[in-house]
Amino acid sequence: MPQAKYQTRADVEALVTPYQVHRDIYTSPEVYRLEMKHLFANTWVFVGHDSQVPKKGDYYTTQIGDQPVIMVRHSDGEVKVLYNRCPHKGTKIAIDRTGNTGKFFRCPYHAWSFKTDGCLLAIPLKKGYDGTGLSETESARGMKAVGDVHNYRGFIFARLAEEGISFEEYFGDSLSSFDNMVDRSPAGRLEVVGQPLRYMHRCNWKMLVENQTDTCHPMVAHESSAGTAVKIWEEMDMPKDAPKPPAMQIIAPFMSPYEFFEEMGIRTWPNGHGHTGVHTSIHADYSEIPGYEEAMKEAYGEERAKEILGENRHNTVYFPNIMIKGPIQQLRNFIPLGPDKTLVESWIYRLVDAPDELVARTAMYNRMINAPTSIVGHDDLEMYERAQEGLMADGLEWVNVQRLYQDDEDFDAEAVENGTTERQMRNQFNAWVKFMTASMPEAEVLEAAE
């Protein structure tokens, strides 16, 4: 069996320089296993929204990195996150994506049962364990709860590691993007709308995360889709002041020139978070929805309502693997399934007490841009898969993220820069090293990739 290539912190740190990263970050099964063991354990990872489990006993199954988990509404009304594993023989407790388990979970193998906070409830023929010392084992404690869980305005995050950076320190001021998305509801609440659009990508998960703040690709990669739609609209010879239909309002901005994206701006926060659309964005010129502004003014007052609706951030990336669009209430979850396989979930939310036309527009955006049937999303998919294949070529080993690079960039401080900078990508890789190595001993030895 070949020797593991990345055995120490120094080995991992060497994969990232100030303006380039080694291709193994995207292609190596060994690096991928390290990410699952360290990166996704030490960071705060999105699990779901509490409106997915509105009633006691409601549950939703998903994963954090490669760890299967259950998000469940406990009998006390709180949302819990448990490892989806029976402490007896390891059987998955819940195999359905969603459901209601009532007052307890029951293992389908040997019928051990557990309260919805994971505590052991009952074991059939329990007398068979008398005198065996079962009560002194981990199995007797029931289903294991995830290390730490935080509900932020309905969004559930978890940190697998028992100890580590706090939720508040990890996200800091970046939570302002979540605040703006939720505050767009006159009631200050969101509700998930249906199930997400799920779309498999044959590429590394980080390619999708990077692309969310890559503003130099839309006018190139999307020319065949968005560019064609714009050309058709122009050939219709409509009056210049003619209102664009919703579909054109959504698609046309993807063909904005470089200058638009430069002026749009990018903001970065510590720990790998950042967003495009500081000054304006492709979501800034949607048509007004009758009755919405009035409802917002009534809820917040005219000045505050204007402030909320005037913030039109484009994509906010929360490291490691989600992106939200506040103006259209969308969240995309990039779930790693292997070094070259990523499942993308695109969720949409309803603004409670807002006109239904808003969620209709959000659903249209999701279908047109992020669905497996999208006319735009396939452009990105092809680029990701071409990159995954191209990185296997031996001519070059490094990937460049040097656009608008500056010496001595400080990623521990918030920064606002030119909208076409690749600083946010560098920010993400700085965080990647930080959390990959946070719990690694100086000389950890792993098995070589199979």
Image: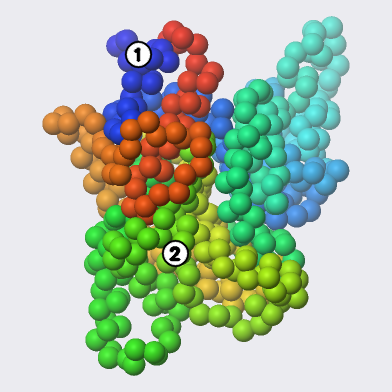
CA–CA distance between discs 2 and 1? 45 Å
Q: Residues within 10 Å of mark 2 (few under 14, many from 20)?
A: many
Who's the residue at 21% across and 29% down the image? 397
Could you classify mark 1 by the number of other residues whose Cα lies within 10 Å: few (under 14), some (14-19), or many (20 or more)?
A: few
Residue under numbered circle 1 = 4
Q: Is residue 151 above or below residue 295?
A: above
Q: Secondary structure at mark 1?
A: loop
x then y, percent, for residue 247: 42, 77
Give, as a three-letter code, the residue at label 1.
Answer: Ala
User: Which quadrant of the view contains residue 72?
Assistant: top right
In the rendered image, which quarter is residue 179 located in? Answer: bottom right
Single out the residue that lies furthest toward the front.
Answer: 407
Residue found at x 40% / y 34%? 409
Using residue 377 as the reference point, say whether residue 96 is left or right of it: right
Residue linked to disc 2: 281
Does residue 91 appear anywhere in the picture? no
Of residues 244 and 383, which is closer to you in this image? 244
Side (left or right) of 95 relative to 261: right
Q: Nearer the viewer, residue 25 or 260?
A: 260
Q: Which residue type carries mark 2?
A: Ser
